[in-house]
Image (tube, rainbow, N blue to C red):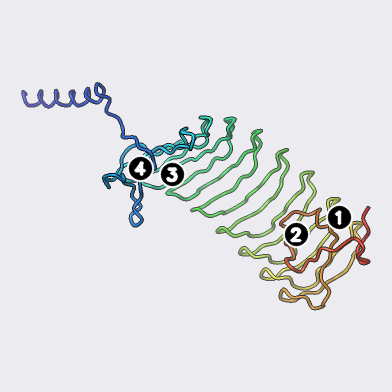
Amino acid sequence: MKKSFINYIFIIFIFLGKIIFGITEKEMNILDLDQDEKTGLVYIKSNKKLFSGVGKLYYESGKLDTIFHFKDGILEGNGIGYYESGKIKLTFNYTKGSINGFTKSYYESGKLETEKYFVNGKLENISKGYYENGKLAYEEKYLDGKLNGSSKFYYENGNLKADLFYQNDMLEGVVTEYLENGNKISVLNYKNGKRQGKSISYYKNGNLYIEANYINNELDRNVKVYKRNGDLDYIAPYKNGKPLTNKKLKASDDMIDEISQDLREILGDDIKITVKEENNLEDKK
């Protein structure tokens, strides 16, 4: 009975000691810590001991940048990143050195910018990004750290910008890109991450611009180029990515300006930007 009472008093003493003497987690500047290249464990530079406590990173101004928690040299627990203004920029969580759970980033205004979910350091389920006005910017699906399923991107006005599908981190099936007004820019086909089948691009007015075919990411068969009014301009035959004639595909500079950066690369080096005076192109007003 006496021994139990002494043990009880000892436990109370330890508990009160933490309160009275202010024993808290050790805090250190991240610059005073280092990481073992082989084990990945974080230790204190001055004594080479594994670090347990709070690691803090600072801006050059001295303002707090990011807070990390460590246990026995491994990231463990919640972390917070800040703007130099003091507003929260990022929240995250680590378990046994791997990022786990929801990671959220914020605009300096406090509005949510991105939200992602991790399992053992790999993206999982749905990741979302937002414009500062709160509208959805993109939505992607992940499985074991790889893009799998539908991915959609949106303009700030809420209209669809691009509709894609991934399988094991590679584009698969139809990829459609839109202008902000809803008109299609392009419709491309993919298989195992490579262009396969018909690829089509459009003018801003919605008329067909280029119609091409790909086999294993290389141009094949006839590539058709149309005028803005819908009339066929000319045809250039290709086989295994190589032209069968000396005739290069041509487009006026304002034609090229109408399409997205991705579509400027639709034909790679085989597209040649020319001036309006080319007699085989429609004069534009």
Number of marks present in the image shown? 4
Q: CA distance from mark 3 to mark 2?
A: 39 Å
Give the quadrant of the N terminus. Answer: top left
Residue type at mark 1: give it: Asn
User: x and y percent of residue 121 in the render?
Assistant: 44, 49
Say which residue label 2 marks: 264
Badge nearest the viewer, 3 or 2: 2
Mark 3 lies on residue: 100
First reached walking from the N terminus: tag 4 or tag 2:
4
Is 24 on the left-hand or right-hand side of 274?
Answer: left
Q: Residue furthest front?
A: 61
User: Which residue corresponds to the image point at 80% horizontal and 66% vertical from the top-left?
Assistant: 272
Mark nearest the camera among 3 and 4 is 4
Q: Which mark is residue 207?
A: 1
- Asked if the residue under mark 1 is in contact with the one under mark 3, i.e. CB atoms within 8 Å, the reply is no
Give the mark nearest the N terminus, 4 or 1: 4
Residue at left offset 70%, top offset 61%:
189
Element type where label 3 sits in the image:
loop
Which callout, 4 or 2, points to the residue nearer the camera? 4
Q: Which mark is residue 32?
A: 4
Classify mark 4: residues with Cα within 10 Å, few (<14), some (14-19) or many (20+).
few
User: Of helix, strand and loop, which one carries label 2?
Assistant: helix
On screen, residue 62 above or below 149: above
Q: Residues within 10 Å of mark 3 (few under 14, many from 20)?
A: many
The numbered mark, 3 or 2, whose residue comes first in the sequence reads 3
- Location of residue 132 by image quarter: top right
